[in-house]
Image (cartoon, helix red, strand yellow):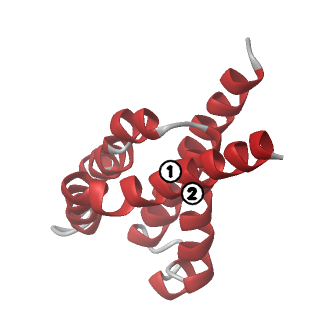
Amino acid sequence: MSNYGLKRLAGVFLFLVVTACWVLGLAAAEQDWITWDEFVLLIVTILSAVSVVLTGYLGRIMDAVWLGWVPGAVIMAVGFAIPPPGDEVGSALIFIGGLVLIAWPVYFLPLIALGVWLRQRRVASAQAA
């Protein structure tokens, strides 16, 4: 496998790991294992955005096209799978997952495109030197 193939695979893996962390955190908050205030911190959002840019830097735009739906679909699936002790358990995950599923291009595509642009710019400057 080429060096580029390994980098692209690393970018996809990073995206999926961050998705898994978000799903675990959202499910833990939904089950009251942690509070929403403990989970939804600015630093988590910033690190998540940086990881998506890094995914684009390591991968390419097509990765965003086929990976973008994964977080929303998984979050919704977990919301449906949570056994409801009450009527509304899991509903926040279903709502958030649906929102991500519908609006993922607004968040993921620009950040991944930024990562791809940064990589192309670095390659162009290295070739010019």
Who is closer to the viewer here, 67 or 8? 8
Crowding near pointer 1: few (<14 within 10 Å), some, many (20+)?
some
Residue at (48, 52) in percent of width and height: 112
Q: Residue 85, how many percent across, how many down? A: 27, 63
Residue at the extreme front = 128
* Res. 27 image quadrant: bottom left
Q: On the image, numbered disc 2 is attached to which residue?
A: 53
Q: The residue under label 1 is which amino acid type? A: Thr
Find residue 18 and report its horizontal and vertical position in percent.
57, 53
Numbered circle sitting on residue 96: none
Residue at left offset 40%, top offset 59%: 110
Mark 1 lies on residue? 19
Q: Nearer the viewer, residue 71 or 87?
A: 71
Give the percent coordinates (x, y) of residue 99: 21, 62
Density class for disc 2 (Cα within 10 Å; few <14, some 14-19, many ≥20) is: many
Numbered-mark total: 2
**Element assignment for label 2:** helix
Expressed as whole percent of the image width and height from the top left, the position of residue 87 reads 15, 67
